[in-house]
Image (tube, rainbow, N blue to C red):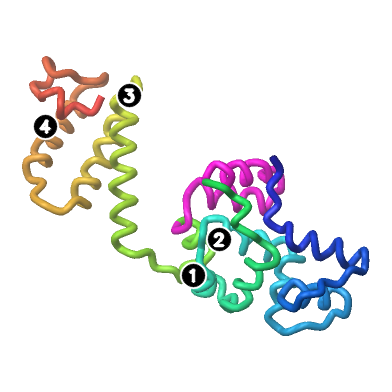
Amino acid sequence: MSLQPNHIYLTICGAVEKKTRPTSAGVRRDLYDLLTTKKGVAALQRSHDIHTHEFKRETLEALLLVSATPEEVFDILRVPVDVTKLYLQLFFDPTVFEDELDIIDYAKNISDKTFGGELKQFAVDLGKECLKTRLARGTYVVDAEIVLDSVRSTAFMMTQVARINRTDSSMSNAALRWAQVGLRAVPGDTAQDESGLDKLRIALETHDSTTNEEKSGISKEQILH
């Protein structure tokens, strides 16, 4: 299935070619008039300009692909809210995606396009906050709770990698460091957990291979691998 978020624009272009102007008033007829007379309100002209330039189009659409609101787009790119709303009405219809599988598939299928594919794949793989950080060029401050959630998630994934794979001490130490960071990002008393991690660090630093309960004297619940 080939999803085309710009299907409304393509329909209007077809109408222009056939000279069949939409009868009902609205933004579709406004776009038709813009395409045929080169005249239209400023917001519509800007929205069309974005769509006709690859780098502008793909940057905006990467944000829209991960459900950024017009207000969020304004905060990151300074594109006026009314321009983004028109863009969603005419050039990028997110309702063509039935679920996240469609979004992932769409990003995958356009990945051969050097700029747009790479940016949209980045957006889908890493999410809205990572994309906003990338596009804001240092001006976007991530909410502290989002940072904490990210640290916790990364710490969890690293410890799981160490658990399910055949890992050496280097990988285990990396997982351990993330576990320590993760514990500090979790509210509450972590003194007991820190004590267990200290014991595990000593075991890892004094053995070239992975440890076990018999060698280290540490319970298997505290061993990362």
Amino acid type assigned to the residue bearing label 2 in the image: Leu
Which label lies toward us, 3 or 1?
1
Distance, label 2 to label 4, CA atoms, is 45 Å
Amino acid type assigned to the residue bearing label 1 in the image: Glu
First in sequence: mark 3 vs mark 2: 2
The single residue placed furthest to the front in the displayed view is 23
First in sequence: mark 2 vs mark 4: 2
Q: Which mark is residue 164?
A: 3
Amino acid type assigned to the residue bearing label 3 in the image: Ile
Look at 55% across and 49% down and name the residue there. 122
Q: Above or below — where is 210 with respect to 23?
A: above
Look at 72% across and 77% down and name the residue there. 26
Name the secondary structure under disc 2: helix
Q: Residues within 10 Å of mark 2 (few under 14, many from 20)?
A: many
Look at 86% across and 72% down and name the residue there. 21
Quarter location, residue 112: top right
Q: Which residue is mark 2?
A: 63
Which label lies toward us, 4 or 1?
1
Q: Which residue is mark 4?
A: 199
Distance, label 1 to label 2, CA atoms, is 9 Å
On the question of residue 81 being in view, the answer is yes
Prevailing secondary structure of the magenta residues: helix
Distance, label 4 to label 1, CA atoms, is 46 Å
Residues at discs 3 and 1 in contact (Cβ within 8 Å): no
Q: Which residues are magenta?
A: 100-129
Q: Which residue is mark 1?
A: 72
Q: Above or below — where is 90 with respect to 162?
A: below
Residues at discs 1 and 2 in contact (Cβ within 8 Å): yes
